[in-house]
Image: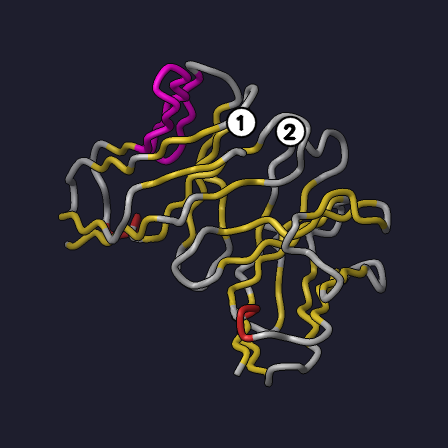
Amino acid sequence: EPEVTQTPSHQVTQMGQEVILRCVPISNHLYFYWYRQILGQKVEFLVSFYNNEISEKSEIFDDQFSVERPDGSNFTLKIRSTKLEDSAMYFCASSEGGNPYYNEQFFGPGTRLTVL
Amino acid sequence: GNSVTQMEGPVTLSEEAFLTINCTYTATGYPSLFWYVQYPGEGLQLLLKATKADDKGSNKGFEATYRKETTSFHLEKGSVQVSDSAVYFCALRGSGTYKYIFGTGTRLKVLA
């Protein structure tokens, strides 16, 4: 069964460093998303991406964050200068074409980011 | 704004016990409601969903009914198994938006 994969499973970085979290969505999906969950808090939406553009983003997704689909298979989240409060589990998701407001989002296992 | 509140965990039950995990929501319009499950080391998997009031979603013995009058979407299962041990997330998606709004998740542990 096709699935969303994410690498690495755990990333440790120093405050101020840049990190790139990688995701491989399901191959025929067209919509891509990032969410995060700070320990003990809710899973929060960060951004959605379609046709090489951001289609929706939350107030969390500020200039420190960017997303990219560098090739036909990967979808990345970059944090330019990490802060302590960026420590969280980051989930990637993807959904089919058609109606994205209706289609199910398929989630990866997450990358745990620890900022020291 | 839209929000989801679900009961705190962890919930510990014996095998074959009845499960209820409460979920209530606040939303404008007519959101779709979801339950996702996360098994250890895996991603969030859709367990069931309901897209309009009074719809009942069901899968693998789990059920939840979209109750607009009480703004609730409680998850139930009549007889849990050890293999149901996981974290369960209630979520909603508002009309005309991509984003899911999740609750904090409820960890379920089922003992043999």
State the image quarter where residue A64 is shown. bottom right
Q: Is residue A89 left or right of residue A7?
A: left
| Subunit of label 1 | B
Please report the residue visible at 74 percent of the width from the left and 51 percent of the height from the top: A27
The magenta span reads: B55-75
Q: Amino acid at mark 1?
A: Ser
Mark toward the viewer: 1 or 2: 1
Up the image or down, B83 lies above or below A79; here it is: above
Q: Is residue A108 left or right of residue A77?
A: left
State if disc 2 and disc 1 touch (CB < 8 Å).
Answer: yes
| Subunit of label 2 | A
Q: Is residue B74 magenta?
A: yes
Asked if marks 1 and 2 fall on the same chain, the answer is: no
Q: Is residue B36 left or right of residue A101?
A: left
- Residue marked by disc 2: A102
- Front residue of A6/A80: it is A80
Q: Is residue B60 magenta?
A: yes
The local secondary structure at tag 2 comes to loop
x and y percent of residue B37 in the render?
Answer: 42, 47
Q: Is residue B102 left or right of residue A50?
A: left
- Front residue of B52/B3: it is B3
x and y percent of residue A90 in the render?
Answer: 57, 62
State the image quarter where residue A65 is shown. bottom right
- Residue marked by disc 1: B32
The local secondary structure at tag 1 comes to strand
